[in-house]
Amino acid sequence: MDLAQYADNGLFAPRKIADAFRTTREEIARTAGLGKDAIQRKDRIRSGKTQRRLREMIEVVNKVEPRFGSPLMAYAWYRSEPLSGFSGQTAMQLVRDGRSDEVLDYIDAVDAGIHA
């Protein structure tokens, strides 16, 4: 999905992300490792940490979307599929721990035929 569809006025918008994934803004916050305030207060939505976490989540989901055929299915993978080589952690757990680069590298390795 085009990144602009997740944004509003140049910022990632929790409401638009939640709509795309057919869930709630609170669930998006939890999935990205953010508190409820981070997606409810305008000043917190604009914060660097909030925008970074939302961006990291969207980057991972967008990267696997072609594999699954829809943003909704890619989001389900992000939340529930344990990744080999990461002690059974999901992409969501790794992103919440600040390890999104490792998830993106893992996806690249799997796409290249290298099993992590």
Image (spheres, rainbow, N blue to C red):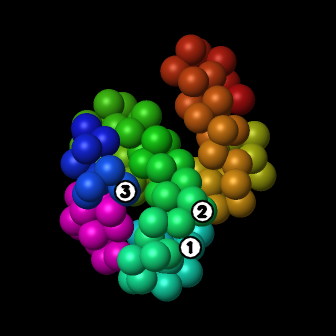
Mark 2 lies on residue: 49
Q: Which residue is mark 1?
A: 34
**Which residue is at a point 56% across and 73% down the rendered structure image?**
34
- Viewer-proximal residue, 96 or 11? 11
User: Residue type at mark 1?
Assistant: Leu
- Check disc 1 and report its element: helix, strand or loop: loop
The span from disc 3 to disc 1 (Cα, nearest Å) is 14 Å
In this rendering, the answer to whether 110 lies above or below 44 is: above
Mark 1 and mark 2 lie on one chain; the one further toward the N terminus is 1
Mark toward the start of the polypeptide (3 vs 2)? 3
Residue drawn at 45 percent across, 66 percent down:
46
**Label 2: how many residues lie within 10 Å, few (<14), some (14-19) or many (20+)?**
few
Measure how far apart labels 3 and 2 are at the Cα level.
Answer: 12 Å
Mark 1 burial class by Cα count in 10 Å: few <14, some 14-19, many 20+: some
Decide if residue 32 is on the left or right side of residue 40.
Answer: right
Please indicate whether residue 17 sits to the left or right of residue 78 in the image.
left
Q: Amino acid at mark 2?
A: Lys
Q: Secondary structure at mark 3?
A: strand
Quadrant assignment for the N terminus? top left
Q: Amino acid at mark 3?
A: Phe
CB contact under 8 Å: marks 1 and 2: yes
Does 19 lie within the magenta span? yes
**Stretch in magenta:** 13-27
List the residue tagged with mark 3. Answer: 12
